[in-house]
Image (cartoon, rainbow, N blue to C red):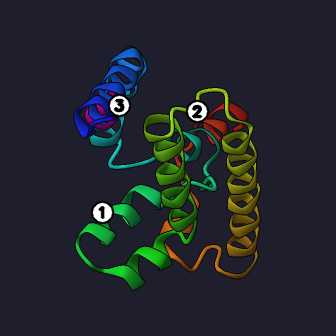
């Protein structure tokens, strides 16, 4: 008979197998936050190089706003956070609970989320740039120094 503990052991084995990737992602996130985010006052690498916000600008702050129960503020920062949250939950369920490792559904879903995020970005840039605080131009970017 299949027990819940067997299921939990299987999930933990999968997480252990993916441990190096999870660790590297977490380490990169911490290093990014400590080195770039703190030193550069929260400017993302794309904005630092080009001066323009990327499609992901505001997603981290949106997620923090969700955890603070400020849903409208989160949605205004970057509405794509909803898509990425749904994708993350979908991925975790498919990978760690259902055990599907080479899953085309995840790839197709990721592609759809990427395309929708870019569409949302384009719409926001057309109608909200540069009025929203997240969608502002960073004048001290590397391109401006290189081409001036």
Residue 135: percent from the left, percent from the top? 56, 67
Nearer to us of marks 2 and 1 is: 2
Magenta stretch holds residue 30: yes
State the residue at coordinates (52%, 67%).
82
State the residue position of label 1. 64
Relative to 51, say whether 62 is above or below.
below
Q: Residues within 10 Å of mark 1 (few under 14, many from 20)?
A: some
Residue 24 in view of the camera: no
Locate residue 7: give its quadrant: top left
Q: Which residues are magenta?
A: 29-34
State the residue at coordinates (49%, 50%).
88
Residue 81: percent from the left, percent from the top? 50, 63
In the image, taking residue 8 as reference, residue 109 lies left or right, namely right
Relative to 11, say whether 119 is above or below.
below
Of the image marks 3 and 1, the number of the one nearer the N terminus: 3
State the residue position of label 2. 100
State the residue position of label 3. 11
Residue 31 in view of the camera: yes
Main SS of the magenta part reads helix
């Amino acid at each position: 008979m299949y027990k819940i503990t067997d299921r939990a052991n299987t999930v933990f084995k999968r997480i252990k197998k993916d441990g190096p990737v999870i660790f590297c992602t977490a380490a990169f996130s911490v290093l990014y936050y400590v080195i770039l985010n703190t030193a550069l006052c929260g400017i993302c690498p794309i904005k630092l190089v080009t001066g323009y916000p990327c499609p992901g600008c505001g997603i981290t702050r949106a997620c923090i706003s969700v955890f603070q129960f400020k849903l409208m503020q989160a949605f205004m920062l970057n509405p794509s956070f909803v898509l990425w949250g749904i994708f993350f939950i979908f991925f975790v369920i498919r990978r760690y609970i259902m055990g599907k490792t080479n899953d085309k559904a995840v790839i197709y879903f990721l592609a759809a989320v990427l395309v929708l995020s870019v569409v949302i970005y384009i719409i926001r840039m057309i109608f909200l740039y540069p009025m929203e605080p997240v969608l502002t131009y960073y004048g001290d970017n590397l391109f401006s120094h290189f081409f001036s």
